Structures are given as C-alpha cells and as structure tokens.
C-alpha cells in the first residue's frame, strides 16, 4: 500500500496533506515510515505534552481497555470518580467537572452552561480568538477563514480587541451571559494577555453578573509553566475549558465549573462518550505524570532557556519572539510557510499561527540538547532567504 496515495484517494479533502508519513513517536521525536527521526515542535497541535509513547499512558490504557472501556456517566465508575476528584482539586473554586471528547465540545458546553445559568444570551469573545469549529465555538472564533461560508452562525456573539480593557468594559453589559478568553491566544498568533487585562475581565464580569470562561485548551496542562495558564494571573474563572493534553493524547475534553454556574440539572447537557473509563484512566495517568515529572516546572525552565536563545538570533526577518513557557511564537516580517517547509526539510516539525508566526509547541519532555539543536536549525533557516513558492 502506498500510504500517501491511499490517504489522498479517500480523504475528505479537509486537510492540507503533507507528503511525510509518520508512523511512530518517542518522547519529543517522531519517526517517518523510513525510520528518519524528526524533532516534534507541534506535539499534535499541543496535545502531546507528555511526549509520545509515554509508558505510563500505554500501561493505563492497556489495563483499563481490558477492564471496562465504556460506561455512560449516569453510572458511577472508579476511574471517573478518581479523575473527578483529582481534576477538581487543581484549581480552588473550580470544583465540579463535565467531561466530553474534544476542545470544541468543551467550549460548546461552556456556552450552554453560561446561558442556562444566568438566562442571558450574549457572549463576548476576542478578536483573533480561536475556540473551535462547531457552530457555537465557531461563532466565538474570530478569523473569517474559519467562518466564511457557514453563516448564519449562532446569534448573540460579538468580538472585541484583545488585551484592551476599555473595549471589554464597553462590550460587557447586564445582558452578557459570558466573556470567553484565551489567556494566551494560540492559533491567533501566540499572544499572552497582560495580567491587568485578565484581572479587569474578572472584575468587569463580576460587576455585570456575567460569567468568565477561560479557554485553556491549548495553554493547559503545564504548557505555559503552570498547570493552567490562568495561574499566572491570580484570578479564578467561572468556567475553564480544557482538552488536548488532558488524557495524554487520548481524545478527551472537560469543563471545570465554578460556584457561580447554576442550573446544571439532569438532561441539560450530556455526551455518550463523555467520562468513559478508558479516557478517565488515561487522564489520571497523564495528570500523575505531569505532577511526578514536574512538567509545568520543566516547561517554565525550558521555555525561558528557549526564548532567551531565540531572542539572540540575529536575523532581519524576525519581528518579535514572544510566548509563555513552551508556548512560543516567532513573528516574522514575511510569510512563514517557506520557513516551516525549510524546517521540515531539516527534520523539525513546527506550526504556523496565522500567516507570519512560527509556533513552537514541543512536548514538555523535550531535552535541552534537542532545544539547542532546534535553535541551531532555526538560526540557519531564519538567516537564509526562503523563497515563497
Ligand atoms: C484555544 C482553543 N480552543 C479550542 C480549540 C478546539 O479544540 P478541538 O480541535 O479539540 O475541537 C483549540 C484547538 O486548537 C484551541 O487551541
């Protein structure tokens, strides 16, 4: 079987396909079908925080798969109960949880919970925000690229300039159900919010009786140097959405729920697969590894090391290096596509964030040696002219 040809024949067509076939991962490395090693600075768009093929995740999955894979949340289960207890002690004040299967589902749920909680309709989101691609989430996602062709979207959504307290202050009224924010915008270009902005968002929501939703789908689980990025900001949201790395790579999403969220009664929302014992077992293992290996601490130290080195690259092509922990953006003065291609030719897999930002989201287990190698290759690529084909 020719893998590339087979996928090209049967694909939905929704993905811009690479010609590189990846068949195995180990730590921060990926291997192609010929055994060539690549340094993974994408981590499946921020999923593989623990690295690939972590033995503790494999063990938990094997054990649970041979015990019980599926169980609707109406029936209590040992794995789910253990995960609930663990996840609800991560952030004081967020002590209930809803489990689902992906990021966009977590965001959808957070909007439904907001509207049912306070009976209001309006949701305020930020410009450049990315919250997913299903209808509710898409209505909060800003970029036209994702929205065009799908109107009418869900009514009641508006967007205000990010990191702008005045704009938020004007937009939030007594009819606002919730404000949704990423504390570090990911897809939008890797923009960390100012502390004052997030603290003001909390105050503004409190003053007007709106709920504050923080979307930590990309920034959660150690990525920014704390378990959740919001811990850098000294406030607690009413709802926190997470997914990606929650279950060590196994599909799972969750909404952490604070005490201001009301009216969550049977039947208001639900999910067939949500909270299944297999994903729960994987998530318990993932959270245990995050704590045991102090991956948030590693992300903080390695992120600082990486950013310091990146800031020293002397290239007229670089406009700015920014980020938090191991969520790093290198903004260029031109389109990044040819640079990402050049990196891949040198066996580094990186992401873009918009047209002009190279986004680095490596597994948090990346070694200092691998970071040095990444910086050497980036220096080479960024100081050489790359042609946009
Ligand atoms: C901040 C944020 N919210 C929501 C999503 C949507 O998550 P999913 O692709 O799992 O639906 C993403 C995905 O990249 C994200 O980065």
Image: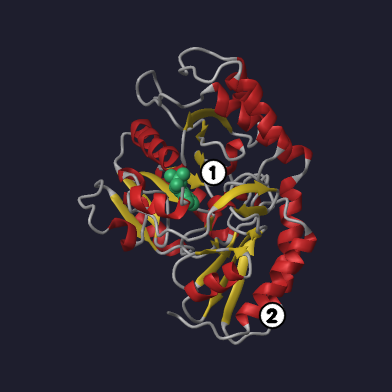
**In-image side of 65 versus 56 (left or right):** left
User: What residue is pinned by disc 1?
Assistant: 244
Q: Is mark 2 within 8 Å of ligand 1?
A: no
Reply above or below: 109 against 166. Answer: above
Q: Nearer the viewer, residue 236 or 345?
A: 345
Q: Secondary structure at mark 2?
A: loop
Is disc 2 surrounded by few (<14), some (14 to 19) or many (20+) residues within 10 Å? Answer: some
Q: Gap between marks 1 and 2, in whole Å?
A: 31 Å
Image coordinates for residue 132, horizontal then vertical, percent? 40, 48
Q: Is mark 1 within 8 Å of ligand 1?
A: yes
What's the mark number on residue 313? 2
Reply above or below: 317 against 206. Answer: below
Which residue is the extreme one toward the front? 1
Q: What residue is drawn where x is 47% and y is 50%?
A: 3
Q: Secondary structure at mark 1?
A: helix
Determine if residue 205 is in view. Answer: no
Q: Nearer the viewer, residue 369 or 332?
A: 369
Quadrant where the C terminus is found in the figure: bottom left
Which residue is the extreme one toward the top? 75
Image coordinates for residue 206, horizontal then vertical, percent? 47, 44
């Amino acid at each position: 079987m020719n893998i590339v040809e087979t996928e090209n024949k049967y694909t939905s067509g929704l993905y811009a396909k690479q010609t590189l076939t990846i068949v195995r991962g180990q730590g921060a490395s990926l291997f192609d079908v010929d055994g060539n090693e690549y340094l993974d600075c994408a981590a499946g768009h921020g999923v593989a925080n623990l690295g690939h093929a972590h033995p503790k995740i494999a063990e938990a999955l094997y054990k649970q798969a041979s015990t019980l894979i599926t169980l609707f949340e109406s029936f209590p289960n040992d794995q789910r109960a253990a995960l609930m207890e663990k996840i609800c002690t991560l952030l004081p004040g967020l002590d209930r949880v809803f489990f689902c299967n992906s990021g966009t589902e977590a965001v959808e749920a957070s909007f439904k919970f907001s509207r049912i909680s306070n009976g209001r309709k309006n949701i305020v989101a930020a410009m450049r925000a990315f919250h997913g691609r299903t209808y509710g989430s898409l209505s909060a996602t800003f970029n036209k690229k994702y929205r065009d062709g799908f109107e009418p979207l869900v009514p009641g959504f508006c967007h205000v300039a990010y990191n702008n307290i005045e704009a938020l202050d004007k937009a939030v009224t007594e009819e606002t159900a919730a404000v949704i924010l990423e504390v570090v915008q990911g897809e939008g270009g890797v923009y960390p919010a100012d502390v004052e902005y997030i603290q003001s968002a909390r105050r503004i929501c409190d003053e007007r009786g709106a709920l504050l939703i923080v979307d930590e789908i990309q920034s959660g689980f150690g990525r920014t140097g704390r378990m959740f990025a919001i811990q850098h900001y000294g406030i607690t949201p009413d709802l926190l959405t997470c997914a990606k790395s929650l279950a060590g790579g196994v599909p799972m999403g969750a909404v952490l729920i604070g005490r201001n969220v009301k009216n969550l009664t049977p039947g208001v929302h639900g999910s067939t697969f949500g909270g299944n014992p297999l994903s729960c077992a994987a998530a318990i293992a993932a959270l245990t590894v995050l704590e045991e290996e102090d991956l948030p601490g590693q992300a903080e130290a390695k992120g600082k090391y990486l950013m310091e080195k990146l800031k020293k690259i002397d290239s007229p092509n670089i406009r700015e290096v920014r980020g938090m922990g191991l969520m790093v953006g290198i903004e260029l003065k031109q389109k990044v596509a040819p640079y990402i291609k050049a990196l891949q030719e040198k066996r580094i897999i990186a992401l873009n964030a918009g047209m002009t930002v190279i986004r680095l989201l490596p597994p948090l287990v990346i070694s200092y040696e691998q970071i040095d190698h990444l910086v050497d290759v980036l220096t080479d690529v960024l100081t050489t002219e790359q042609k946009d084909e």
